[in-house]
């Protein structure tokens, strides 16, 4: 059991260490899927999560990781609330998360059709395929440095 009184900020800090299984450069907080943390008087922690899309195959793995991370820190009771409305949007990715994507070699989502290469920052890029390694990414290539990269699609 946790010996000190739990607070939302501490739980949120712990959740910043839970990585997304499909893009391990990002925490679930960076990704913006942690919508809320509630702590009841008996110290039961409820974490509200919004998956990136309703059929995301990583949803259950993320929920299990959250429970395990909090129990590892001594939280006795953890509840996950999955919320689909409003739907997750790439606007919820933090600025820090966007920079982490770039450093990891994935172009962050952009409303512009000019997608910058995460390696050399050239805008001379082209989409190779609408589909990447996961449903939320597309395959791109840079004509300048010739490196392939993935682009995190706007949703």
Image (spheres, grey):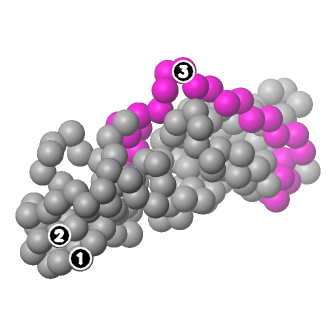
Q: Quadrant of residue 144?
A: bottom left
Q: Quadrant of residue 12?
A: top right
Is the C-beta separation of discs 3 and 2 under 8 Å? no
Left or right: residue 101 versus residue 33 is left
Left or right: residue 68 versus residue 83 is right
Could you give the CA–CA distance between mark 1 and mark 2, rounded to whole angstroms?
5 Å
**Residue hosting label 1:** 147
- What residue is at 34 percent from the left and 46 percent from the top? 153
Task: In the rendered view, tell whether residue 127 sits above or below residue 75.
Answer: below
Could you give the CA–CA distance between mark 3 and mark 1, rounded to whole angstroms?
37 Å
> For residue 85, which numbered disc appears in the image?
3
Task: In the rendered view, tell whether residue 121 sits above or below residue 59.
Answer: below
Packing grade of label 3 (10 A; few <14, some 14-19, many >=20) is few
Indicate whether residue 63 is drawn in magenta. no
Q: Which residues are magenta?
A: 70-96
Left or right: residue 143 versus residue 60 is left
Q: Position of residue 112 (x, y in %)?
A: 15, 43
Looking at marks 3 and 2 on the same chain, the residue that comes earlier in the sequence is marked by: 3
Is the C-beta separation of discs 1 and 2 under 8 Å? yes
**Residue hosting label 2:** 142
Question: In this view of the protein, can residue 121 be seen by the observer?
Answer: no
> Which residue is situated farthest in the front direction here?
129
Element marked by disc 3 = loop
* Pair 3/1: label in front: 1
Element marked by disc 2 = strand
Quadrant of the frame with the C terminus:
top left
Packing grade of label 2 (10 A; few <14, some 14-19, many >=20) is many
Q: Looking at the image, which is closer to me, 10 or 17?
A: 17
- What residue is at 74 percent from the left and 35 percent from the top? 80
Could you give the CA–CA distance between mark 3 and mark 2, rounded to whole angstroms?
36 Å
Q: Position of residue 100 (x, y in %)?
A: 38, 62
Left or right: residue 55 versus residue 97 is right
């Amino acid at each position: 059991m946790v010996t000190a009184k739990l607070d939302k900020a501490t739980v949120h800090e712990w959740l910043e260490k839970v990585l997304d299984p499909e893009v391990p450069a990002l925490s679930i907080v960076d990704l913006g899927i942690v919508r809320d943390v509630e702590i009841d008087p008996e110290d039961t922690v409820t974490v509200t999560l919004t998956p990136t899309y309703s059929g995301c195959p990583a949803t259950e793995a993320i929920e299990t990781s959250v429970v395990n991370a909090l129990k590892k820190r001594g939280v006795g009771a953890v509840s996950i609330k999955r919320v689909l409305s409003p739907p997750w949007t790439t606007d919820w990715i933090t600025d820090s998360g966007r920079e982490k994507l770039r450093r990891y070699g994935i172009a962050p989502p952009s409303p512009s059709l000019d997608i910058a290469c995460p390696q050399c920052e050239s805008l001379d890029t082209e989409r190779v395929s609408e589909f990447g390694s996961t449903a939320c990414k597309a395959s791109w290539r840079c004509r300048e440095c010739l490196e392939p990269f993935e682009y995190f699609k706007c949703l």
